Image: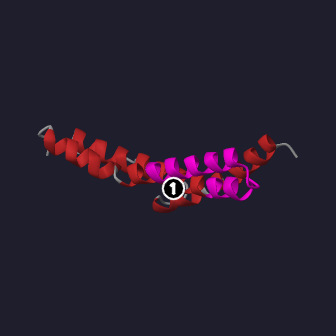
Amino acid sequence: MKKIVVHIIAFVFLFCFSGFVFGATCPAGQICNPLTGVGNFGELLTKIADGVGTLIATLGTIMIIVAGILYLTSAGSPDKMTKAKTALIYAIAGIAIGLAAKAIVATLSKVLGGS
C-alpha cells in the first residue's frame, strides 16, 4: 500500500472523532456559537488563542509520535536519525508555543493597554 493512502486513512480515522469532542458542549442537533460571552476584542483574541493553541498542541503531540516512528524505522541511518531528531525538536517547540498561546495574548493585551 502506498504511503499516501496510509496517511489519508490515518488522518480520516483521527478526525472522525473530532465531532465527539467539539460537539460535547452543545445540545444534540444544535450548532453552538463559539463567541458567546465575548465582550471586547481582547476576549476574542483570547478565545482564538485557546483554539489555535489547542490545535497546535494536538498536532505537536501527533508529530512526537511520528518522530518516534521515524527514529525507530531509521535502521541506523544517520540522515534519517537526524531528520527524526529535528522533527522531535520542532514538535516540542510547537507544543510549548501552543501551550503558551493564551499567555502570549494576555501579555500582549496588557502591554498594549487592553483590559
Q: Is the magenta stretch mostly helix, strand or loop?
A: helix
Task: Please give left or right for residue 55 compared with residue 49 in the image.
Answer: right
Q: Which amino acid does label 1 sit on?
A: Phe
* Residue under the point 40% across and 53% down: 96
Q: Is residue 71 left or right of residue 90?
A: right
Question: Which of these two is toward me, 15 or 100?
Answer: 100
Q: Please report the residue visible at 56 percent of the width from the left and 47 percent of the height from the top.
A: 86
Q: Single out the residue that lies furthest toward the right.
A: 1
- Counting from the top left corner in percent of width and height, residue 113 is at 11, 40
Which portion, as a residue range, is magenta? 65-94
Residue assigned mark 1: 22
Q: Residue furthest left?
A: 113
Q: Is residue 82 magenta?
A: yes
Q: In this view, does 71 lie to the left or right of 97?
A: right
Percent across and percent down for residue 58 are 52, 54
Q: Is residue 100 visible?
A: yes
